[in-house]
Image: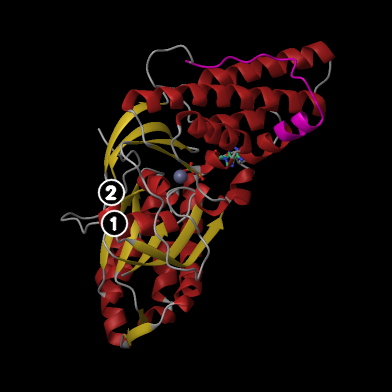
């Protein structure tokens, strides 16, 4: 089965094609599922949003609308055609959707109606698209694109939860395009997933793929959001995570000892919830105090590095404590970490050590699959995606479980 994945939940326009065979079973001996990555393309708008210090949803929507068609043209070069649409067939589908979509999604609709290459029906079996959570205006672009393509090519469209995408992404051993058939990493159950991204921070119990229980989540800011806000306070561009990480690594290399002490939020609370807004405010006060102490208007590079290191340590110690709590409370047999923040080297090191401590495998995403991508959406759709008996709808706060 060949699945086309579409992801537009935030500021990455992403498409992927995968081929799968066999049936996934959480019982390893019965598992015959295999997957082959054909192609995975990501167009990031981060630079564009950098000027606003965060993602500007209506700008992101327009960009997705413009970018998705050239990306489609590119990715479809990796498939063969199984037929061709006559001009009248193409136009009749476009006309049937015009009234509903043209005014809501003019960039997408305008580009698709001019895209002659879409008349070649590719050899794909289904389209998997992110339905939520994410930014509603941007989610709609992916959903509308999936609906148009599904109707043009007569293939089914399956909705995927973006957070489940981040879970399954970490089970892929290789994301190499045009790659070999691979089995997914063995997911011993019950498992714990720690999802850390710009919009979410959640600890989840995986009963089996598709069956999740939320163990804890942030009460305010997501951890990626805290990285981004702290980066801003230090005068670094958006997205701030990689910049903080770089400064923190330099602080370690240069032996800089932080002069500030930041809180480890909710570290002593008995539950598995998290909170990062207070930590960000503590950084704000630390920056103000440092400026006052030095009588300058800008932080020195040494101060920035010290604060970045202390901030990363505060985040790491907090997540370590909560991850340990989650592993112990469910008796986890494996751990999955997913989401953009899992690219962070200090966190990756610490999660690997926790795995050794509990003798459980810890699955981390590759650089390509840690941030938003469509490979994870195609994979989640191929694993257990179902055509739903309702119209697809952007759900900004779509949940993984109750
Ligand atoms: O999963 P993701 O790409 O998008 C969302 O679904 O939110 O996560 C983006 C977040 C941003 O907040 C970004 O600053 C953070 O991931 N991030 C990092 C690193 N790379 C990206 N945070 C810490 N360290 C990194 N190396
Ligand atoms: Zn994400």
Left or right: 346 as drawn, with respect to 160: right
Front residue of 340 and 237:
340
Residue density around tag 1, few if under 14, some if 14–19, many if 20 or more, within 10 Å: some
Q: If the image is split into quadrants, where does the C terminus sit?
A: top left
Left or right: 234 as drawn, with respect to 182: right
Q: Which residues are magenta?
A: 248-266
Q: Position of residue 98 (x, y in %)?
A: 30, 68
Identify the secondary structure beneath mark 1: loop
Coloring scheme of the render? secondary structure
Residue density around tag 2, few if under 14, some if 14–19, many if 20 or more, within 10 Å: some
Q: Earlier in the sequence, mark 2 or mark 1?
A: 2
Q: Is residue 391 visible?
A: yes
Q: Are marks 2 and 1 in contact (CB under 8 Å)?
A: yes
According to the picture, the residue beneath numbered tag 2 turns out to be: 26
According to the picture, the residue beneath numbered tag 1 turns out to be: 31
Is ligand 2 closer than 8 angstroms to the Cβ of mark 1? Answer: no
């Amino acid at each position: 089965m060949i699945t086309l994945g579409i992801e537009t939940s935030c500021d990455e326009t992403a498409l992927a094609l995968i081929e799968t065979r066999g049936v996934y079973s959480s019982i390893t001996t019965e598992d015959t599922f295999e997957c082959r990555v054909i192609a995975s393309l990501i167009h990031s708008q981060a630079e564009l949003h950098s000027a606003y210090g965060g993602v500007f949803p209506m700008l992101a929507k327009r960009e997705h609308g413009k970018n998705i068609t050239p990306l489609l043209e590119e990715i479809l070069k990796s498939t063969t055609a199984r037929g061709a649409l006559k001009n009248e067939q193409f136009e009749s589908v476009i006309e049937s959707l015009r009234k509903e979509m043209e005014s809501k999604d003019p960039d997408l609709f305008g580009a698709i109606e001019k895209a002659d290459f879409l008349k070649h029906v590719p050899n794909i079996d289904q389209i998997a698209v992110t339905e939520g959570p994410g930014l509603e205006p941007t989610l709609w672009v992916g959903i509308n694109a999936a609906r148009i393509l599904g109707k043009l090519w007569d293939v089914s469209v399956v909705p995927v939860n973006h957070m489940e995408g981040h879970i399954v992404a970490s089970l892929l051993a290789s994301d190499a395009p045009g790659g070999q058939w691979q089995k997914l990493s063995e997911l011993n159950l019950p498992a714990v997933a720690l999802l850390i991204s710009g919009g979410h921070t959640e600890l989840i119990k995986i009963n089996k793929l598709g069956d999740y229980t939320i163990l804890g989540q942030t009460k305010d800011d997501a951890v990626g959001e805290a990285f981004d806000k702290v980066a801003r306070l230090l005068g670094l561009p958006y997205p701030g995570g990689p910049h903080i990480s770089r400064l923190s690594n330099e602080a370690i290399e240069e032996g800089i000892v932080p002069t500030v002490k930041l809180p480890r939020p909710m570290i002593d609370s008995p539950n598995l919830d998290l909170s990062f807004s207070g930590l960000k405010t503590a950084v704000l006060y630390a920056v103000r105090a440092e400026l006052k102490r030095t009588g300058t208007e800008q932080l020195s590079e040494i101060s920035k590095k010290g604060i970045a290191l202390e901030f990363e340590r505060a985040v790491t110690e907090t997540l370590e404590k909560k991850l340990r709590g989650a592993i112990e409370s469910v008796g986890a047999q494996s751990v999955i970490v997913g989401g953009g923040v899992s690219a962070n080297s200090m966190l990756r090191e610490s999660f690997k050590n926790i795995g050794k401590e509990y003798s459980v495998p810890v699955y981390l995403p590759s650089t390509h699959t840690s941030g938003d991508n469509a490979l994870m959406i195609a994979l989640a759709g191929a694993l257990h995606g179902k055509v739903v008996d309702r119209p697809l709808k952007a759900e900004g706060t779509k949940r993984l479980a109750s």
